[in-house]
Image (cartoon, rainbow, N blue to C red):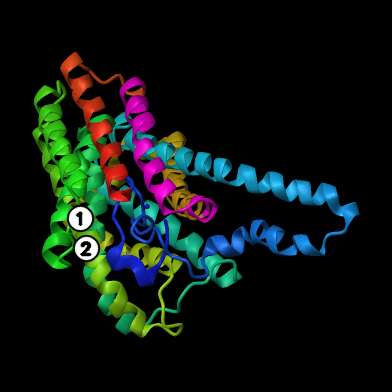
């Protein structure tokens, strides 16, 4: 309900749905970006090691060796960081919404987006991150994307409250199917036979998983399918809007950090309106759970992890590439699903377990098919 990169190639890039609960939802759509990014600034030391090697003398052998070790360990360290932050955020969101029985998903989204906004603004002012100066024309163009973004986050929050993590992971495969159909209709982008086969397998797994789900919840499934539609819509709309939006920037482009800021900053007034409309502010004021310090620690940690997903995914892509990034993103669903089943003691039958494993396999097959 949450990072990476090539604006020129976005229309041809394959989309993987954003992580559940990610506060930016931008990073996987921009997975081929090659212009100067935040990761280039934060991790330029690794790059400098390659270019500066020619100036090292023989006495600098240890330093060269150190750079070589950093180059080898970079992909592993960045990949582990990305997977840990992704898994941790989903689990923490589940703890907040289900473990503490917190019934104000919009308020939680508002709090997480506020954390992200404050941190990105601070990084922009401090010069660590390149943040585009916002103007009314840019905001006006971006509002349709932001409205869908808010719907995506809210539906993701509520689906995670009522549906177990493993089933959410499997059902989100529907997003890939809807996105592929949208690409075919809007961009005339045709998929190969392997991709359509993988999508057919994902449909079968989603249906069988729902039928065999012992803890089936109609409201939760309605929220999750709404989330799939909104996530696919967000991905497709973002592709159309980005080219238009960058016309109203000073630099002539719109980097991922600026998009994270746009999404999170613009979501705050909309979220505040929804909080008042749904009467959540009364619930939050009177709920006993908000008086618990641990609740705020976990909620704050989930917000920080959302931003961490942006940074670590940038870092991971910088160290590897779109193909590895996409495959690891699919494989990452396996530990998330298993952890969700174990930690939250989800009632499980053998047919449902088989359906979940089959769905995970279909997701990995889909990622591999998109790479071919």
User: Which residues fall within the magenta stretch?
Assistant: 315-342
Query: In the picture, residue 360 is in which quadrant?
Result: top left
Q: Residue 238, position in %: x, y?
A: 27, 66
Q: Position of residue 321 (x, y in %)?
A: 46, 53
Circle 2 SS class: helix
208 horizontally vs 269: left or right: left
* Residue at image coords 50%, 54%: 311
Against 25, residue 292 (above or below) is above
Identify the residue at the far right of this view. Answer: 59
Query: 200 and 212: which one is in front?
Result: 200
Q: Nearer the viewer, residue 252 or 20?
A: 252
Q: Is residue 273 above or below residue 356?
A: below
**SS type, badge 1:** helix
Q: How many marks?
A: 2
Disc number placed over residue 236 in the picture, else none:
2
Residue 195 visible in the displayed image: yes
Asked if residue 340 is among those painted magenta in the image, a careful observer would answer yes
Question: Which disc number belongs to residue 316?
Answer: none
Q: Which label sits on residue 232?
A: 1
Residue displayed at 43% across by 37% down: 88
CA separation in Å, label 1 and label 2: 6 Å
Q: State yes or no: residue 371 in magenta.
A: no
Give the image location of residue 211, x and y in percent. Answer: 8, 26
- Could you tell me if residue 104 is visible in this image? no
Q: Quadrant of residue 197?
A: top left
Answer whether labels 1 and 2 touch (C-beta < 8 Å).
yes
Residue 25: image x %, image y %?
33, 56
Rendered position, 299 above or below 350: below
């Amino acid at each position: 309900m949450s990072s990476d990169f090539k604006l020129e190639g976005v229309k041809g890039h394959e989309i993987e749905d954003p992580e559940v609960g990610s506060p930016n939802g931008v990073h996987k759509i921009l997975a081929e970006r090659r212009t100067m990014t935040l990761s280039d600034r934060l991790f330029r030391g690794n790059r400098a090691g390659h270019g500066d090697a020619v100036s090292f003398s023989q006495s600098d052998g240890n330093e060269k060796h150190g750079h070589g070790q950093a180059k080898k360990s970079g992909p592993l360290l960045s990949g582990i960081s990305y997977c840990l932050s992704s898994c941790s955020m989903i689990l923490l969101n589940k703890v907040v919404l289900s473990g503490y029985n917190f019934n104000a998903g919009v308020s939680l989204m508002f709090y997480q987006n506020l954390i992200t906004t404050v941190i990105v603004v601070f990084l922009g002012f401090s010069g660590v991150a390149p943040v585009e100066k916002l103007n009314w024309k840019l905001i006006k163009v971006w509002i349709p994307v932001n409205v869908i973004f808010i719907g995506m986050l809210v539906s993701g929050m509520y689906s995670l409250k009522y549906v177990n993590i493993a089933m959410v992971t499997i059902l989100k495969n529907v997003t890939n199917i809807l996105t592929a159909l949208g690409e075919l209709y809007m961009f005339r982008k045709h998929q190969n036979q392997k991709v359509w086969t993988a999508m057919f397998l994902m449909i079968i797994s989603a249906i069988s998983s729902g039928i065999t789900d012992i803890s089936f919840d109609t409201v939760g499934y309605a929220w999750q399918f709404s989330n799939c539609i909104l996530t696919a819509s967000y991905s497709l709309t973002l592709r159309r809007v980005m080219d238009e939006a960058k016309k109203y920037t000073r630099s002539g482009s719109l980097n991922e950090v600026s998009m994270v800021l746009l999404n999170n900053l613009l979501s705050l007034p909309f979220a505040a309106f929804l909080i008042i409309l749904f009467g959540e502010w009364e619930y939050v004021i009177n709920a006993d759970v908000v008086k618990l310090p641990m609740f705020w620690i976990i909620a704050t940690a989930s917000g920080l992890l959302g931003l961490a997903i942006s940074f670590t995914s940038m870092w991971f892509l910088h160290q590897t590439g779109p193909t590895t990034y996409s495959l690891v993103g699919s494989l990452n669903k396996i530990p998330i699903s298993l952890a969700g089943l174990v930690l939250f003691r989800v009632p499980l039958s053998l047919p449902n377990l088989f359906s979940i494993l089959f769905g995970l396999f279909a997701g990995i097959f889909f990622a591999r098919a998109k790479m071919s």
